[in-house]
Amino acid sequence: MAEIPAALLLLADARLPAGGHAHSGGLEPAVAAHAVTDLADLRDFLHGRLATTGLTGAALAAAACAYAAAYAPDADIPPSGDGSAGGRRGWRGLDAEADARTPSPAQRRASRAQGRSLARAARATWSHPGLDALAAEVRAPHHPLVLGAAAAAAGGTPRQAAAVAAYGAAAGPASAAVRLLGLDPLDVHRVLADLAARMDEVADEAAAAAAGGWDALPAPSAPLLDLLAEAHVRAGLRLFES
Amino acid sequence: MGAHHDHDPHEAAPPAGRALRLGIGGPVGSGKTALTAALCRALRDEYALAVVTNDIYTTEDADFLRRAAVLPDDRITAVRTGCCPHTAIRDDISANLDAVEDLQARHGRLDLVLVESGGDNLTALFSRGLADLQIFVLDAAGGDDVPRKGGPGVAQADLLVINKTDLAPLAGSDVARMERDALRVRGGKPVALTSLRERPDAPEVAAWVRGALRRARGAAAAAP
């Protein structure tokens, strides 16, 4: 197991001031639809999220980490982009890949809002040419891209970036469940601990996939989450942005 | 207005070229939205204004301000806080900063952005990264021991507003004692007594904000 740079722990910490507390990862509309009402439902929801948007986000984060690392002055590979995204190269190409894997407009907006906030926090924290290039090329990048670039800036590997993304995909909604359903936070953390091995598998799969071309990145989808995300923006009562 | 209202060691000037950001915080139901509306009405003809509301439920506060037509729709933005109103103004201000930046980008030069917190408890405090100055609003009928207890909002806000003074006698609250306690825990920083029901234009608070805006402009003009 590779050593974890302490800087990377900042990125995984929920106290990172990057706007995450106002997003429930689709849990709020699921609660509103009575699809998640207790701890067992939450476990199933998190399993499903990890297998779908969790894997997609982790793979995008791993790809972004590898791409950003190539910007470093001592990198072996020049950052050429792989040019596979409809002829759009560079960060905009990878951003288009994220769009293609995020069919719900509401989820796209939520991802970009969190990407914008994370870019602000990461650039205030680290200086890195890959991160700067991402911010210059895409105004509000998708969240996994910024997470991957920030992981590179923090000295992390693509596999570690994927692990932080997978962890966030489960920990974010879990925290929202404590606030929305009044679940026992100790129970919720046991659910997260039980999912840790699954997060590692997702990170392995994501990192392996990211080693190939961008157009072949995983794209599992969760149509019900897409529909709930769209219903959420029309709901009268919303405590979370997404 | 209480004593020493010209003395404020924390007076902060915004960096040149951007609006003064004024946070308005305080417990649920103390009159934050009514004060925001009052300041908009009092200042909108003199200054370029915009408002960000933080509501823990819905966009109700923003909707109230729109219905009251205190500002055009596109000058009011609502931020959701994920059940954590204090987090959004203190620990993680990113959504509010994004909202302020978007308003600035949409309207060009703004003089003043009011950031109204969601209703919270007495420990709430705006981050200096979000608000250059902050007002904390208390309900005079909500217990006259509150100023004595203090807390970050009551003690540190640049202006403490004790609102609903008209209700104080009905609730058995001693407003004079509240003002006295507040001035003591605040080290002499200003306290305003208001009844937004009786004086919906809040002239003493508007005068304080005008003073802050003048000083901010003076500081910007004096900057190299």
Image: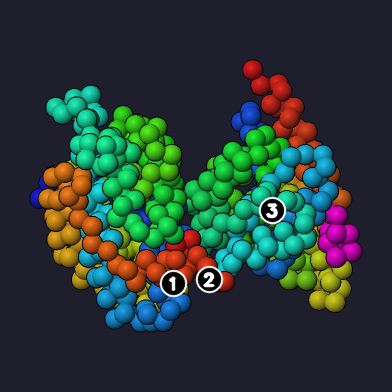
Q: Position of residue A221 (x, y in %)?
A: 27, 64
Left or right: where A193 falls relative to B209: left
- Which mark is nearer the camera, 1 or 3? 3
Q: Which amino acid lies under the numbered mark 3 shown in the image of this protein?
A: Asp
For label 2, the crowd category at 10 Å Cα-Cα, with few meaning under 14, some 14 to 19 and many 20 or more, is few
The disc placed on residue A235 is 2
Q: Which amino acid lies under the numbered mark 2 shown in the image of this protein?
A: Ala
Can see residue B86? no
Queried whether the magenta region covers residue A72, the answer comes back as no
B161 or A156: nearer the viewer: A156
Q: Which residues are magenta?
A: B194-202
Task: Give a yes or no on whether discs 2 and 1 share a subunit.
Answer: yes
For label 1, the crowd category at 10 Å Cα-Cα, with few meaning under 14, some 14 to 19 and many 20 or more, is many
Vertical placement of residue B136 versus A40, above or below: above
Q: Position of residue A33 (x, y in %)?
A: 43, 79
Vertical placement of residue B17 versus B155, above or below: above
| Res A173 → quadrant | bottom left
Disc 2 versus disc 1: distance between alpha carbons? 8 Å
The disc placed on residue A29 is 1
**Residue, disc 3:** B73
Q: Which amino acid lies under the numbered mark 1 shown in the image of this protein?
A: Pro
